[in-house]
Amino acid sequence: MAINVLLNGAKGRMGQAIAAAAPLLGITISAAIDAGDDLATHLDTCDVVIDFSSHRATRNLLELAVARHKAVVIGTTGHSAEEKTKLLELAANVPCVWAGNFSVGVNLLFALTRRAASVLGADYDAEVIEMHHRFKKDAPSGTAARLLEIILEERKLTSSALRHGREGIVGERTSTEVGIHALRGGDVVGDHTVMFAALGERIELTHRASDRGIFASGALRAAQWVVGQTPGVYDMQDVLGLK
């Protein structure tokens, strides 16, 4: 589908990847803006906004999108849980795809993790390990955060079960905790592993990204899909028909 995209966060790594991938998919970037630019002046020329800017800019973006009835695709991460809950309520007023990761492979990882967490009981200890490049500002990654949400949902646990690394005499691991470990270094695009470890066996589900272009293509695919959808918050599982 030929659409016009307003790209917010154009100078970032993802913004540059999206700008490079758009012409290959027949998509026009009607405006490419970044911090300090006036978002409102460019909204009327686009069909959808793709946002990979800063978590501090999300509320303003959504308020403008709701006022102008524009579809949005949000890949920005770093929001607190409380902040994201309020933003999702606002985003539901327009067609919105909000995802921590736009890779087809990662979204299959989400589906497989949900299945594994539903089948494997509390005797299988769940841990999530992620690694990204040294320049990433937030931790855990949006993808890791979604993997954790899935595990907590399937095991009917709250966020109090999460253990962000371990240090000192922490005692034996309990059956209700879920570990999360964030590694940073070099130029790693994004590695994610979900581990279910029991006495006698271990299951690992791993996705490794080597080219940021896979995320850009996924975000553009989401933009094509969301235009014309009814208002509501969707994710890549909806876009890919995995639900």
Image: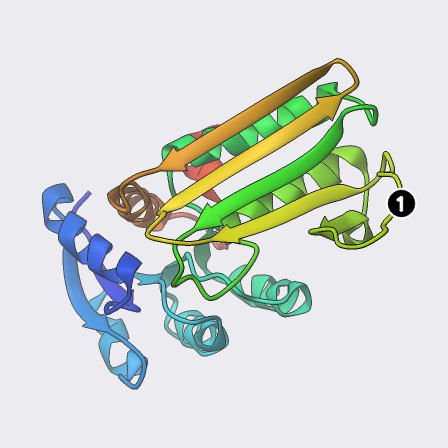
Residue type at tag 1: Gly
User: For residue 122, what is the image quadrant?
Assistant: top right
Residue 172, percent from left and from top:
88, 39
The colouring scheme, among rainbow, by chain, secondary structure or one colour, is: rainbow
Q: Residues within 10 Å of mark 1 (few under 14, many from 20)?
A: few
Q: Is residue 230 left or right of residue 112?
A: left
Quarter of the image containing the N terminus?
A: top left
Identify the residue under disc 1: 171
User: For residue 215, what is the image quadrant?
Assistant: top left
Camera sees residue 145: no
Q: Nearer the viewer, residue 171 or 31?
A: 171
Residue 178, percent from left and from top:
74, 41
- Among all residues in the image, which is located at the extreme front? 168
Quarter of the image containing the C terminus?
A: top right
Identify the secondary structure beneath mark 1: loop
Q: Nearer the viewer, residue 108 or 188?
A: 188
